Image: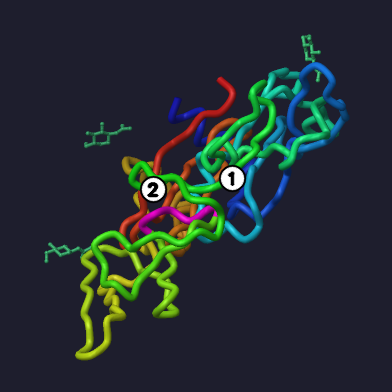
Amino acid sequence: MLTLQLSMMYSTIAVVILAEAMLSIAAAPAEGRQIGRFVVGQYTRGGCEIQGLYPHDIMSFDSSEITRRYRLGEQWTERCNNCTCTTAGVMCEGPTDCLHSYDFTQEKWCLEWSADECCCERMGCTVNGEQYDIGERFPYEGGASCLTCSCQIGTTPAQCLLQECGIVELICENRSVTYEDGNCCPNFVCPQGVKCTNIPDPFPNTSNHELLDWYGRLNPIPQGMNQHYHLDSWTSYVCSCPRGGTAECEMRTFGM
Ligand SMILES: *[C@@H]1O[C@H](CO)[C@@H](O)[C@H](O)[C@H]1NC(C)=O
Ligand SMILES: *[C@@H]1O[C@H](CO)[C@@H](O)[C@H](O)[C@H]1NC(C)=O
Ligand SMILES: *[C@@H]1O[C@H](CO)[C@@H](O)[C@H](O)[C@H]1NC(C)=O
């Protein structure tokens, strides 16, 4: 397995930072629903890929959860959309009359689905068991009274916007938080910074120089971002940087 990956790697190395893309699947059909035909994903490297990202969420959303890859010719049903991976992209047939056209982020951020489960009818956040609409404010957990969070699609509870203080909470390894006298807004100190500069070697037992050159291209990952290092059509080394410092990586095989 390792040998195969290495030899395939040289021909098709591509380092891809997930670009923002709003490739939405139009939602679902049921009786009486209006059905349309859509292209919702790209054909690339012998398969199809759909990223269900909203453009403004790229900094905070864990995009690895919602990037989907399919083999050419593969067919599937997604929230009442019948989809096929073709060389022209992902072609889907589905409803056109949903309030929000479907994309994969809704699997995480939808609070209410229609009775036929084809359409998301209410988007929002669930934090500590409470539901909030988009834009709705809620208290900062364990924080000072001047701090609030608001529900923004793509914002995790731990990355609340501290609206009263005008800063975004920093999450990082070995963080310290200080409060200046007379000011309830925090200062976050991140000794290791808010990038992941330590990225585990995908092939720790290899001393191949070309590999090391490639390894040298594993650039620091800003916190909250993911990087997908595509080794071949179906294998990626996927690294996330949840807290700065050391990245968390795994080898993923798609479509097998
Ligand atoms: C999807 O496929 C199923 C099964 O073939 C069919 O019953 C349904 O009408 C299709 N839906 C759409 C939106 O084409
Ligand atoms: C965080 O602090 C602990 C204890 O001070 C230390 O052992 C650890 O190496 C630090 N983490 C990083 C990434 O430097
Ligand atoms: C790499 O080497 C370590 C230590 O020698 C060993 O535990 C591990 O199984 C090896 N990994 C692979 C993929 O060969």
The answer to whether residue 137 is left or right of residue 141 is right
Above/below status of 160 relative to 209: below
Q: Residue at x 65, y 43 (%)?
A: 51
Q: Secondary structure at mark 2?
A: strand
Nearer the observer, 186 or 249: 186
Q: Residue at x 83, y 36 (%)?
A: 39
Q: How many marks?
A: 2
Q: Is residue 254 left or right of residue 161?
A: right
Regarding ligand 2, which quadrant of the image does it lie in? bottom left
Q: Which mark, residue 127?
A: 2
In depth, the one of 222 and 27 nearer the eye is 27
Magenta region includes residue 117: no
**Res. 64 in view:** yes
Asked if disc 2 is less than 8 Å from ligand 2, the answer is no
**Which residue range is magenta in the image?**
153-158
Q: Is residue 83 visible?
A: no
Looking at the rendering, in which quadrant would you find the N terminus? top left
Residue 224: x and y in percent read: 45, 58
Asked if residue 156 lies in the magenta stretch, the reply is: yes
Task: Estimate the x, y position of residue 129 in percent, counting from the top left.
Answer: 36, 41
Residue corresponding to mark 1: 123
Q: Quadrant of residue 175?
A: bottom left
Q: What element does badge 1 sit on? A: strand
Q: Amino acid at mark 2?
A: Val
Q: Nearer the viewer, residue 106 or 11?
A: 106
Q: Answer yes or no: disc 1 within 8 Å of ligand 1.
A: no
Q: Residue at x 40, y 71 (%)?
A: 162
Q: Residues within 10 Å of mark 2 (few under 14, many from 20)?
A: some
